[in-house]
Structure formats: structure tokens, C-alpha cells
Amino acid sequence: MLEIQQIRLNKKQLAEKLLKVRKADFSKELNEAFRIDELKRNTQQKLDDNKSSLNKLSAEIGKLFKEGNHKLANEIKSETGVLKEQIKKLKDDFGQLEIQLNEVLYQIPNIPNDLVPQGVSETDNEVIYESEFTKPEVNLLPHWELAKKYNLIDFELGVKITGAGFPVYKGKGAILQRALIQFFLNQANKAGFEELLVPHVVNENSGFGTGQLPDKEGQMYHITEDDLYLIPTAEVPITNVYRNDLLSHDDLPIKHVGYTPCFRREAGSYGKDVRGLNRLHQFDKVEIVQITSQEESYQALTEMQKHVEELIKQLGLPYRILRLCGGDLGFTSALTYDFEVLSLGQDSWLEVSSVSNFETFQANRLKLRYKSNEDGKPKLAHTLNGSALALPRILASLLEFYQTPEGIVIPEVLVPYTGFNLIK
């Protein structure tokens, strides 16, 4: 969430930028946050004044008792009772104002970086790179037909077991999926990302910490009896490892990678865009996360972009990189680059990775800080994450791109992990 200091100093400018870039008016929420913050600060001042008065009276009472003036001491003592009641009420008021302030701040998205283009939807995203590729003249099969032809993925069996959006990978399809996961993890390890194996369910505090709650509450699977949530991405448990931590500057950057299944309700999704592996309720993903100092986060973002790009290059897939516009930018992100691979069987682009810098937005929710090397004072860290990579659409693109009359060719980099070079 935004730091309240930002709103105190630049309330009008923040509202103007959100309206200009995200195309959404948050002036009401910013004004309300400013109003509650003023009440909270005034309440804190009254609380401090009353505590100071209580301390002075207590000292005076102690002095009078020592001097033997018990009558005057007891008269003054009655005043302390009134002050204690006032202090208790002020503490309660302060606590309620703090809750109200956070509830308002949770509704305000991150401030876009200056590089974020203006726009209202994905059609306004800026293509900053597209690899060269000549499309074949022959019509290619979409991945769901290839999956059925070679007995790789059974979508109907998934419906039988659970429901739509929960496919069953079979035989070489399951092995190829596992090979991709292992390849992505190994490449991240080589790039200096420490691997974590994390829980696949999180508590409410973790959901709020990284911004999935309350913004994406309707998209998350909620285990009501235990008040736990199935994770939508490994970003949530990995980043929350450092919730409420004060790190040394020398600990930074912290680089982690994790593989997890991901669970998303995808409410409201329908039509051709959800066919096959295009949009699932459960899918596998390898996620990279960085925690950095404020000065180093955009260098880290560039590093993560290059890492994701190299993965796609090694798989040999046609791809493009987009800078998301304000209207398509995630609630918690300051700047996001999407990677899309070409689906030849569908003649469309499929998103396989989002690499984002959240600056202090998540860290402020997480209370994740580090000691500055300059003055030793705590500063909010910057957090970043990226898919490296999401499996369903990568697998879909691979099946379609490498299909031949003889079968589906396995990219050379994956053969050591699959143990075979052709699916036939």
C-alpha cells in the first residue's frame, strides 16, 4: 500500500497521476486517507499530552507523599484517574482510526512508474520487442488436438475428477511438464536464485502482505473452515518469508526461486480464450522473487527480464515483450513487462510471464525494511517478482511450434530432462 507520507506531501499529484495513467479516479480515497491520518495524528498528540500530564502528576504525588502531605497527594491522585480514562479512550480511538486508515489505503493501487504508458486496456500495451519469425504456410493443429492425438493431456478426465480447468497430464505429457519445471529451476539456480519449497496455502495476513487481499479475494480459493487461501502464485509465500523483518543492507539483494502449483478461480472467464491450456484453475509455475534496496530495484528488474527472455530463447519459441499500460497494470505493480509466446495453432499470443517491480508497495504492507548504509535508519525495501516461467501456455506453444509429420520434437535443452527427443 502507499506510504501515508506520500499522501501527506503529494495528495493532489498522486490523484492526477492515477487518473492520467491508470485511467481511474482515486481522489475520494486519497482525500479520505488524508482526513483519517490527520485525525489519527491529532489523537496521537492528545494521547502524548495526556501521558505527559499523567507522568508529571505521578511525580508530584510521589513527592507530596514523601513530604507527608497525604491530603493534597490524594486530592491530586483523583485527577490521575480522569487522565487514565481519557488515555484509555484515546488509545481505543487511535486503534480504530488505524484500522480505518488501512482499510482506505488497501483500496488505492500503486503509483505507476514514469515509464508506464497511458492506456485503458491490453490493446494499449506497448510492444518493445518482437522476435523475427516466418509463419509456416500450412495450417497447424492447436495444442488440445495434439494433446489428444498423442495422449498427453486429458481434459475430460480432469472434469470427471474435479471440474473444468483441472487437466490430467499423462505419460510423455507429464514427463515434459516435469522437464520444463526442472529446467526452469536449474536455470534460476545458476543465476543465483536460492530455491525455496513453500506451503501451497497461506493465511489472511500473507494475502494482505503481498496485495492479493482484498483486491483479488474473488479470484482466490478460500478454505473457510481454517480461514486459509490456496496460493495464486509462489510470490505470496516466498515474499511473506520476510514479513515484519528488518534486514541488513548487506543482506540485499535477496533472490529466491520456487516451484508451486497455482490456484485461481478465474471467475468470469469463458469463450475460446479458455480452451485447452489457455486458462486453468490449477497450473504449475516457477517464480523468481527479489528483495532489494530502493536504489537497486530497477537494475534487478532488468536482470529478471533478461533471465526470462533467455529461458524463452533457449526453448526456441517466437516471443515478444510488452510494457503494460496503466489500464492493464496490476494493482500492486509500479512497472510490469509481459512476455508472450506465439501460439501457431491458434494464431495468437499467449502470456507466459509478468515481471514486475512493486517498489515499496508490498513492503509497506509487509513491514519489510532494511537498515540504510547511509544513516543506519530503517527504510522500506523494494520487492520484485516474475514468472520464470508459467507452464500451461509454454507447453501449449511448444506442442504447436514443434509439431511435425513425424511427431512433436523436443527442444534440445529439454532432452536431458525428458530422456526422449520426439513424441510420436
Image (cartoon, rainbow, N blue to C red):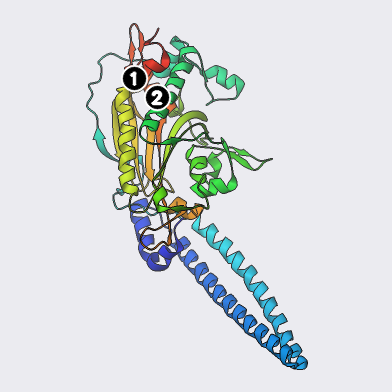
Q: Is residue 300 at least partly visible in the picture?
A: yes
CA neighbours of label 1 inside 10 A, class few (<14), some (14 to 19), many (20+) = some
Q: At 39% from the left edge and 32% from the top edge, which residue is drawn?
A: 188
- Apparent side of residue 121 relative to residue 221 in the rendered image (left or right): left
Q: Which residue is mark 1?
A: 413
Residue 293, numbered circle: none
Give the structural element (helix, strand or loop) at label 1. helix
Q: Is 330 located above or below residue 269 in the figure?
A: below
Element type at mark 2: helix
Residue ID at (49%, 35%): 196
Looking at the picture, how far across and down is residue 125, in whole percent? 31, 41
Type of the residue with mark 1:
Val
Q: CA distance from mark 2 to mark 1?
A: 8 Å
Sequence-first tag of 2 and 1: 2
Is 27 left or right of 140, judged from the image as shown? right
Answer yes or no: do the residues labelled 2 and 1 have beta carbons within 8 Å?
A: yes
Q: Mark 2 highlights which residue?
A: 183
Q: Of residues 294 and 89, which is closer to you in this image?
A: 294
Please tell me whether residue 248 is drawn above or below residue 51 in the rendered image: above
Give coordinates of residue 40: x percent, y percent. Answer: 54, 70
At which x and y percent is residue 162? 60, 24
